[in-house]
Image (tube, grey):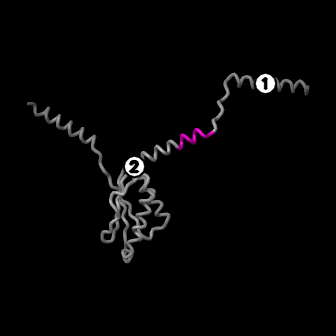
Amino acid sequence: MDWGKEKYKNAQRAKESKKKSTRVVVKEMKYRPKISSGDFETKTRKVEKFLHDGHKVKITIMFRGREVTHPELGRDILDRIAERTDDYAKVEARPRLESRNMTMVLGPDAKKAKEKKSEEKKEAAAAAAAAPERPAPPTAEEVEAVKAQRAAAAAESESDNG
């Protein structure tokens, strides 16, 4: 038995198995209970981008001081995010309060995303069918005929003037 050959085969098998595996990346986005609407929109757009890229997203609401006595504020924010991303994401871990942080995990939902894309394609096809068609561009012969007519009209107007 050739040890070098066996070692090579094992390395090739390991390489193949690595190709087929996928790494799950968990991105994190941190919010605060008193977040302004502009900041909320920006952070939520970033969460949507992560989900569209196929990453899981851990959303953390950080409570400071006495804010922890109002966990409903954090739950409202998490509910708004979950509702906004409902079309293409699923909640993998429900909101949970852990000391001064409330966390929730969202994951991309391939089934919902495919359904939404197919609906968008159907709508785009329907809109394209309903749109009026553009006329075909003129052929070379038609262009030449128009030029000849213009030249004849110009020659006629010169003879009338002169």
Say if 6 sits above or below 42 in the image: above
- Tell me the kind of residue under disc 2: Asp
Secondary structure at badge 1 equals helix
Residue 93 appears in which quarter of the rendering? bottom left
Residue located 66% across and 32% down the image:
135
Residue 2 appears in which quarter of the rendering? top left
Residue 138 appears in which quarter of the rendering? top right
Q: In front: 22, or 128? A: 128
Assess disc 2: are there few (<14), some (14-19) or many (≥20) residues with their C-alpha within 10 Å of its C-alpha: few
Say if 69 sits above or below 7 in the image: below
| Location of the N terminus (image quadrant) | top left
Residue position for label 2: 53
Residue position for label 1: 149
Q: In front: 159, or 10? A: 10
- Tell me the kind of residue under disc 1: Gln
Q: What's the magenta bit mostly, secondary-structure-wise? A: helix
Looking at the image, residue 39 sits to the left or right of residue 66; the answer is: right
Secondary structure at badge 2 equals loop
130 falls in the magenta region: yes
Q: Indicate the position of residue 102 as horizontal and vertical percent values.
A: 35, 67
Assess disc 1: are there few (<14), some (14-19) or many (≥20) residues with their C-alpha within 10 Å of its C-alpha: few
Q: Which residues are magenta?
A: 123-131
| Location of the C terminus (image quadrant) | top right
